[in-house]
């Protein structure tokens, strides 16, 4: 839990720095987050590569794990359907479009804004950012109470990038490849599913 609070505090600090423009414009124009993410992926790659048992453990994982992305998608839709009954001014298709971002807030919010307008696009942005933040903050608790696959499923499309380091830390290095696999598959579905529900 302490590690999650540290991560959240860094996020909050970055948010304040961005809001109040405390960094030079030239610095902000650089794609800093991309390079930091590359650095994180590189360091985790070294850690996994230095431990040959990680790949061996992945081979021993139950083949049913291959269905994890599908279960993540279906579980998300079921949650969205349950919440949609309390949202009176939006159709079920609109709610499913927002949920089908699976944490990929940059792409899904742009697509939804183009199809449905800025209001629903903003809702998509906020809800998918919240999915990512909740995974970052509560990953250790998810592992403790729901198992090692829980933060991977909760992370949705973010499990191969932003939530990847905390997932590896919480679930273990032997789940790193599962996390990347989940992220790639779910990430790939986002533009198709969001577009599909926006067109209904």
Image (spheres, grey):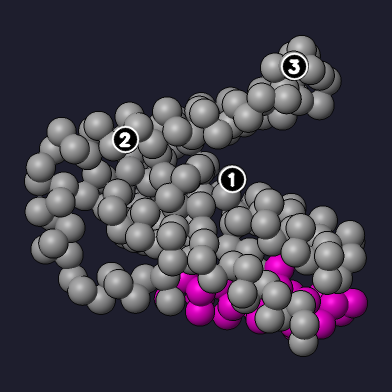
**Mark 1 or mark 3, whichever is nearer to me:** 3
In the image, which residues are magenta? Answer: 71-98
Q: Residue at x 74, y 54 (%)?
A: 125
In the rendering, at what x and y percent does residue 142 appear?
41, 54
Taking the spot 13% from the left edge, 55% from the top edge, the residue there is 57
Q: Secondary structure at mark 2?
A: helix
Vertically, is 185 above or below 70?
Answer: above
Q: Which residue is mark 1?
A: 133
Left or right of 179? Residue 59 is: left
Please determine whether, in this image, residue 25 is positioned above or below residue 15: above
Q: Main secondary structure of the magenta part?
A: helix
Magenta stretch: includes residue 90: yes
193 relative to 128, above or below: below
- Residue 49: x and y in percent read 19, 38
**Circle 3 residues within 10 Å: few <14, some 14–19, many ≥20:** few
Residue 122 in percent (x, y) is at 82, 56
Q: Determine which residue is flagged by label 2.
A: 44
Mark 1 in CB contact with mark 2 (< 8 angstroms) = no
């Amino acid at each position: 839990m302490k590690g999650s609070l540290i991560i959240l505090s860094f996020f909050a600090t970055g948010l304040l720095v961005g809001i109040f423009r405390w960094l030079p414009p030239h610095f902000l124009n650089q794609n800093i987050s991309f390079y930091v993410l590359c650095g994180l992926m590189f360091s985790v790659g070294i850690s996994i590569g230095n431990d040959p048992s990680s790949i061996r453990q992945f081979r021993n994982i139950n083949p049913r794990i291959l269905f994890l992305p599908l279960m993540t998608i279906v579980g998300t839709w079921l949650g969205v359907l349950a919440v949609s009954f309390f949202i009176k001014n939006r159709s079920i298709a609109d709610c499913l479009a927002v949920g089908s971002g699976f944490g990929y807030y940059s792409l899904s919010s742009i697509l939804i804004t183009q199809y449905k307008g800025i209001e629903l696009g903003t809702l998509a942005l906020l809800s998918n950012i919240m999915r990512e933040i909740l995974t970052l903050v509560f990953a250790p608790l998810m592992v403790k109470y729901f198992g090692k696959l829980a933060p991977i499923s909760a992370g949705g499309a973010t499990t191969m990038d932003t939530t990847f380091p905390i997932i590896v830390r919480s679930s273990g290095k032997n789940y790193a490849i599962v996390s990347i696999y989940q992220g790639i598959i779910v990430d790939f579905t986002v533009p198709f599913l969001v577009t599909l529900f926006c067109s209904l």
